[in-house]
Image: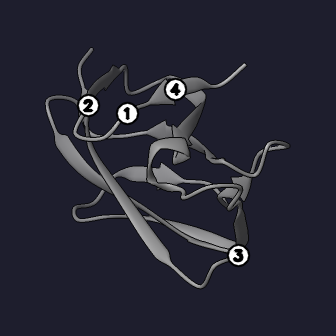
Amino acid sequence: MALAILATERLVKQPAENKLYSCDFTNLLVGSAVLTGTPTVTTVGVGLTIGAPTLDATTKKVEVRLSVGTDKADYRLEFTAADDASNTHEVDCILRVRD
């Protein structure tokens, strides 16, 4: 089960942890729209390992595995995904790495 991310949420992980995170786009989608295509997850900074993001089975969430990270570093994550109505959505959150 992935840890859910809400917009502007601050997450905390330890440097040695390797976890699957899920970013929910439900509130950004209009009507019966669903996410399509290939989502992206980016950050500024070094040390954090970001796996290949995928759409979950509901196609309303983006899942990504995050690992490593520099102790005492804060990473701003940008989750970007398109929907089947030709809209592009972005959700940001802060990941704090603390041992």
Q: Determine which residue is flagged by label 2.
A: 9
Indicate the position of residue 52 as horizontal and vertical percent values: 67, 61
Which label is found at residue 6?
Answer: 1
Q: Determine which residue is flagged by label 3.
A: 84
Image marks 1 and 4: residues in contact by CB distance under 8 Å: yes
Mark closer to the observer (2, 3): 3
Distance CA(mark 3)–CA(mark 1): 21 Å
Q: Is residue 5 left or right of residue 64?
A: left
Which circle's residue, 2 or 3, is located before the other in the chain? 2
Looking at the rendered structure, the kind of residue marked 1 is Leu
Distance CA(mark 2)–CA(mark 3): 26 Å
Q: Is residue 39 left or right of residue 73?
A: right
Q: Residue at x 54, y 58 (%)?
A: 30
Image marks 2 and 1: residues in contact by CB distance under 8 Å: yes
Looking at the rendered structure, the kind of residue marked 3 is Asp
Q: Residue furthest front?
A: 31
Q: Is residue 62 left or right of residue 24?
A: right
Image marks 3 and 1: residues in contact by CB distance under 8 Å: no
Which circle's residue, 3 or 1, is located before the other in the chain? 1
Which residue occupies the foreground of this view, 99 or 38? 38
Indicate the position of residue 92 as horizontal and vertical percent values: 29, 52
Q: What colour scheme was applied to this rendering of the protein?
A: one colour
